[in-house]
Amino acid sequence: MHLFLTIPFLSAAAALSPRFYQDATQVALQDGVIKVPVELGVMSRCPDALICEAVFSEVLKQVGPSKVDLKLVYVAELNSTEPDFGVTCMHGPGECAGNVQQLCAARYSSKWWDFVRCQNDQGRFQVGLPDVAFECAKEVGIDWETSGVGNCAGLDGSGKASEGVDLLRKSLLRGKALGIKKSCTVLINHEKVCVHDGSWQECEGGHDVDDFVKQINHEYERANGGSSGWY
Ligand SMILES: *[C@@H]1O[C@H](CO)[C@@H](O)[C@H](O)[C@H]1NC(C)=O
């Protein structure tokens, strides 16, 4: 009975406003299934983040995008004396710019993950550079100017536009609320399951692609009432 009452409400809410809905409840619903939330606590120029993101590209390929709601959450500190972002990023302002570009891509484009992977492929010190952002946007098929990404992250690619900076501040606060301290921290269903900090640590369920796949599939079936789902 509980499910019966809940599902129509969730579907209606999701149909009306997916973004609001996700922000409000942190549960992603699509086609009547609940996706498993996976959050990676990262810093865009951090070597540990690049390792995590490479691993999760494989994980996504194996579980399929329809089961997972993947988000990057940025590790940084609020700093009112920092002039451009009001945020200090460990690897410098260029990293803050990279974080903003990625957040804006995620907000306005379904191709955001390819965008992040493209930036990473250029090497971590290239992440955040405007020209790299423009090139990667082009490569993955995001129109910087018309997609909304550019307005969010700055048409000049600097990351210093108010909408993007606001997303960065919210993201780091969300990371703190989730207890994320290190890049890279892996959360599945909002639970910390693994950290990569120089090496893999605190990974009770393992840290291979298969281990993450297994954990995601387990959460998916738990959330959707077995492999057949609700419907
Ligand atoms: C805050 O930002 C200023 C200007 O970038 C910097 O000099 C200072 O070290 C930062 N403080 C912290 C705690 O990171």
Image (tube, rainbow, N blue to C red):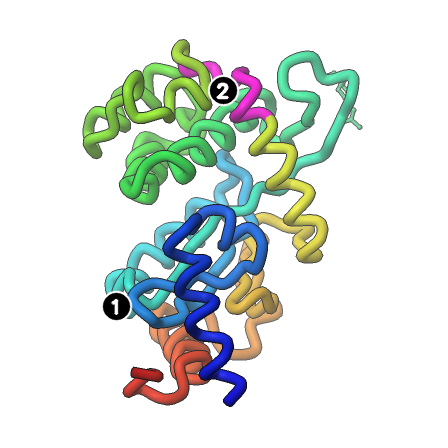
Query: Which label belongs to residue 130?
Result: none
Of residues 183 and 100, which is closer to you in this image?
Answer: 100
> Which of marks 2 and 1 precedes in the sequence?
1
The magenta stretch is 157-165
Which residue in the structure is indicated by mark 2?
Answer: 159
Q: Is residue 182 left or right of residue 72?
A: right
Q: Quadrant of ligand 1?
A: top right
Disc 2 element:
loop
Indicate the amino acid at tag 2: Gly
**Residue 178: x %, y % from top left:** 67, 57
Compared with residue 227, is residue 116 higher up or lower down, i.e. above or below?
A: above
- Distance of label 1 from label 2 (alpha carbons): 33 Å
Compared with residue 183, is residue 196 higher up or lower down, i.e. above or below?
A: below
Q: Residue at x 31, y 36 (%)?
A: 115
Q: Quadrant of residue 219?
A: bottom left
Indicate the amino acid at tag 1: Gln
**Residue 57: x %, y % from top left:** 31, 55
Question: Is residue 166 part of the magenta span, yes or no?
Answer: no
Which residue in the structure is indicated by mark 1?
Answer: 62
Compared with residue 87, is residue 113 higher up or lower down, i.e. above or below?
A: below
Disc 1 element:
helix
Q: Residue at x 43, y 68 (%)?
A: 36
Q: Quadrant of the C terminus?
A: bottom left
